[in-house]
Image: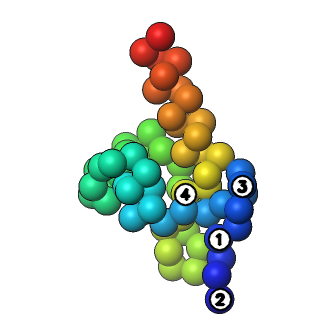
Protein backbone atom coordinates (compact mmCIF):
# COMPACT_ATOMS: atom_id res chain seq x y z
CA UNK A 1 0.00 0.00 0.00
CA UNK A 2 1.29 3.45 -0.87
CA UNK A 3 0.00 6.69 0.60
CA UNK A 4 1.87 9.09 -1.63
CA UNK A 5 0.35 10.76 -4.67
CA UNK A 6 1.81 12.74 -7.53
CA UNK A 7 1.95 16.46 -8.22
CA UNK A 8 1.07 19.05 -5.60
CA UNK A 9 -0.79 16.41 -3.57
CA UNK A 10 2.32 14.26 -3.13
CA UNK A 11 3.23 13.25 0.39
CA UNK A 12 6.94 13.07 1.08
CA UNK A 13 8.79 11.35 3.91
CA UNK A 14 11.42 13.15 5.94
CA UNK A 15 14.12 11.19 4.10
CA UNK A 16 12.72 12.22 0.71
CA UNK A 17 12.62 15.88 1.74
CA UNK A 18 16.16 15.64 3.10
CA UNK A 19 17.37 14.22 -0.20
CA UNK A 20 15.66 16.98 -2.20
CA UNK A 21 17.07 19.71 0.04
CA UNK A 22 20.49 18.04 0.30
CA UNK A 23 20.22 18.13 4.08
CA UNK A 24 20.15 15.49 6.78
CA UNK A 25 16.89 13.99 8.05
CA UNK A 26 17.73 15.50 11.45
CA UNK A 27 17.85 19.00 9.98
CA UNK A 28 14.46 18.45 8.30
CA UNK A 29 13.05 17.31 11.65
CA UNK A 30 14.46 20.49 13.20
CA UNK A 31 12.73 22.62 10.53
CA UNK A 32 9.46 20.87 11.37
CA UNK A 33 9.91 21.20 15.14
CA UNK A 34 10.87 24.87 14.75
CA UNK A 35 7.62 25.50 12.84
CA UNK A 36 9.35 26.48 9.61
CA UNK A 37 8.10 23.49 7.61
CA UNK A 38 4.58 22.10 7.89
CA UNK A 39 4.04 18.38 8.32
CA UNK A 40 1.46 15.92 9.54
CA UNK A 41 1.29 12.43 10.89
CA UNK A 42 -0.55 9.84 8.86
CA UNK A 43 -0.53 6.21 9.86
CA UNK A 44 2.24 6.87 12.35
CA UNK A 45 4.52 8.40 9.70
CA UNK A 46 5.57 12.05 9.59
CA UNK A 47 4.81 13.35 6.08
CA UNK A 48 5.26 16.65 4.28
CA UNK A 49 3.01 17.78 1.45
CA UNK A 50 4.86 18.68 -1.75
CA UNK A 51 2.92 21.97 -1.82
CA UNK A 52 4.16 22.88 1.69
CA UNK A 53 7.75 22.09 0.73
CA UNK A 54 7.45 24.21 -2.42
CA UNK A 55 5.94 27.09 -0.39
CA UNK A 56 8.81 26.89 2.10
CA UNK A 57 11.37 27.01 -0.73
CA UNK A 58 9.59 29.95 -2.42
CA UNK A 59 9.48 31.86 0.89
CA UNK A 60 13.23 31.32 1.37
CA UNK A 61 13.96 32.79 -2.06
CA UNK A 62 11.56 35.69 -1.48
CA UNK A 63 13.40 36.60 1.74
CA UNK A 64 16.75 36.44 -0.05
CA UNK A 65 15.61 38.67 -2.91
State the residue position of label 4: 48
> Counting residues from the N terminus, which is met first, the one under dot 3 or under dot 2?
2
Seen at 59% across and 73% down, the residue is 42
Q: How many residues crowd around disc 1 within 10 Å: few (fewer than 14), some, or many (20 or more)?
A: few
Q: Is residue 4 left or right of residue 41?
A: right
Q: How many residues crowd around disc 2 within 10 Å: few (fewer than 14), some, or many (20 or more)?
A: few
Q: Alpha carbon of mark 3 to alpha carbon of mark 4: how far? A: 13 Å
State the residue position of label 3: 7
Q: Alpha carbon of mark 3 to alpha carbon of mark 2: how far? A: 19 Å
Q: Alpha carbon of mark 3 to alpha carbon of mark 1: how far? A: 10 Å
Q: Is residue 12 left or right of residue 31?
A: right
Q: Is residue 13 left or right of residue 27?
A: right
Seen at 47% across and 10% down, the residue is 65
> Counting residues from the N terminus, which is met first, the one under dot 3 or under dot 4?
3
Q: How many residues crowd around disc 3 within 10 Å: few (fewer than 14), some, or many (20 or more)?
A: few
Mark number for residue 4? 1
Image coords of residue 2 (percent x, y):
64, 81
Image coords of residue 63 (percent x, y):
46, 16
Quarter the N terminus occupies: bottom right
Please tell me whether mark 3 sits on a helix, a strand or a loop.
helix
Amino acid sequence: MTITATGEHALLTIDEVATELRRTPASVRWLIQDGQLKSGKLGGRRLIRRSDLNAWIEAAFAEAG
